[in-house]
Image: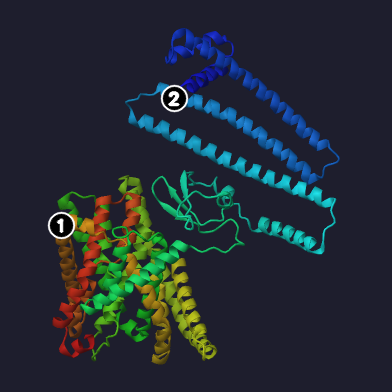
Amino acid sequence: MQLLCWLLCLALTEALPAVPKEQVARHAVKLYRSKGPAHGHRWLTNNCKLLVGLLRQKNVVIHKLAAAAKAVGRDQNLSEPEKLFQVHTLEVFQKELNESEHLVFQAVHGLQRVLQGDYRDVVNMKESSRQRLEALREAAIKEEQEYMELVAAEKHQQEALKNALDKNKTLTILEEILEDVRKAADRLEEEIEEHAFDNNKQMKGVNVEAVLRVEEDEEKGGKAKNKSAQKEVEDDLGLSMLIDSQNNQYVLTKPRDSTMPRADHHFIKDLVSVVMLSLPCGWVCSLVGLPPMFGYIICGVLLGPSGLNSIKSPVQVETLGELGVFFTLFVVGLEFSPERLRKVWKTSVQGSCYLSLLMVGAGLLWGQLLHIRPTQTVFVSTCLSLSSTPLVSRFLAGGSRVEREGELDYSSVLLGMLVMQDVQLGLFIAVMPTLIQAQSGDLDSLLYGGLRVLKLLTQVLVSLGAVLLLCLLLRSFLIGPFYKKLHAESKGNKEILVLGMAAFVFFMLTVTEFLDVSMELGCFLAGALLSSQGHMVTAEVMGCIEPIRDFLAIIFFASIGLHVFPTFVLYELTILLVLTLTLVIMKFVMAVLVLSTILPPGSRHIRWIVSAGLAQVSEFSFVLGSRARRAGIISREVYLLVLSVTTLSLLLAPLLWRITTHRGIPRTERKTLT
């Protein structure tokens, strides 16, 4: 409190130079009455005199530093780099003095703002706290920069002392070699260092936050580090974890010193845990007659936040799992031929669009009855209209499809509709900013949002046309020679073939992502283009890619389990079961109605099994839900409901699929499924 008093006294001294110091002190005592009149009067007067003396002394030192810098510049015995270094060191000290004075006045202004505010106004107190926090963050950055400059100055002094000693000593051949290597290493570090902190701190949207840095001391079990360990932390040699005030955890992605190799041991341990636990979980599910993928989901539940909470890098695990989705869709495309695509493309486009429109219409109707905002109902209904492509591809794996003359193959129709839903997913992600603008309720922004949606639709159609044109060119001129060259180079060694196929998948993925179309569509088209080369090519590529697909799919299904919270499901089991059953039945009925309308009469018997494959919710609702929650489109409660309903629908999907496959298709096709 005494500190606040003399800070206030200092501010008044600067603001009113003509007023005697005695009068300034008496005025400060009236504003802050923490001591007796006589004692407080004397105490404030003495501190005011002390502060005035300190400021005068500071000005004297500043003039001496300026004179010292001029003297260094006139010194003929110093080299130009040495002059620059010494002048820079003096400037750092001068900056420290000015910054200390600035902090004093900043604190005084903060005290004045608090004294003038209303302690009953929480908003005002929050704003004052935010301003103080911003000031402290800026001060921390400046102090960090000065500290690093002083560390560099210390290093330079040590090198200068070493060079002075080396001048009086004859170096051996080995010492001369090491000295040359040291100079080359210094130049290398200067060349590869990016100065990312200095380059990004002034960019728009950059926020400065306080973080906790956690170092794991595995060898000593968390005991105090010795001096060498502490020096390692200061030099940023350890793989530490950062935790911000919002409890977000971060790991090192790119070190300052790129010459030293590093590995994320947290991620490695997470992968080991997932793979080792997925084996018994998948095995048990196979023994009881369930698909093994549910064992992988259970593995994620056991290792995730609702279980042992042993996964330290869930974002990295989920990112690796996304590769499982890409290769799954690539394998799905391999099972398609251009002839099958030509048969089902019209049905797939119409069916997916009609089903999405029906879901959005039903969502708006329920929103009107329950008085829910239209933006929220549109988002939730669009999320729930999507279905899981990896899950259905697992259902279809291993079964041949019987296709009679004049009929459509149910697997082709089902997978075609799912791929078109993936395209709609990319469009919906692009439209999300418009939903955020509509959330504010501004008419101008709403009109602008409608025009923006029309523009996005036009861009998507143009992008799809460009993708199809590229696929036609690749099929006509590139795919055949490319595969023949890979096949010739990979005799006796499949590495080139696997690498070539993976590179082609990633090329198509990059093209579709660049054109603002779904990346999943690019993976599917890559497989479809290769399937046009014939059955032998498809079989060879499938034999190389399927093991990779299976391993990454295990990681993907385990990452789904990380977002399953059994405790929340048990708390709200009744309402979640009702919502899930209602959603599954509604999607099934809507799909049956749509397919009954668009399918030719000879193929309408497949509408039951296709509808069963669509009667669940895609795992991408996790991604969409998290983005919408951050943007404020949906609340935390709605997000958890979407998450839980999605999980339960995925668990119910195999049951509905088995019932439909035994009752909804002819006996001639039932054997192929079993």
Looking at the picture, tell me which residue is in the foreground, 55 or 199. 55
Q: Residue at x 36, y 73 (%)?
A: 553
* Amino acid of disc 1: Ile
Q: Relative to 522, is 256 above or below?
A: above
- Which image quarter holds the N terminus? top left
Q: Residue at x 25, y 89 (%)?
A: 403
Res 131 quadrant in image: top left
Q: Position of residue 424 (x, y in %)?
A: 33, 66
Mark 1: few/some/many CA within 10 Å (<14, 14-19, 20+): few
Q: Residue at x 42, y 31 (%)?
A: 128
* Amino acid of disc 2: Arg
Q: Position of residue 358 (x, y in %)?
A: 21, 64
Q: Is residue 232 left or right of residue 507?
A: right
Q: Are marks 2 and 1 in contact (CB under 8 Å)?
A: no
Please give the label number shown on residue 14: none
Q: Is residue 418 visible?
A: no
Gap between marks 2 and 1, in whole Å?
Answer: 51 Å
Please give the label number shown on residue 575: 1
Q: Residue at x 26, y 78 (%)?
A: 395
The residue pinned by badge 2 equals 113
- Which image quarter holds the C terminus? bottom left
Figure coloring:
rainbow
Q: Is residue 628 left or right of residue 177?
A: left
Q: Give SS at disc 2.
A: helix
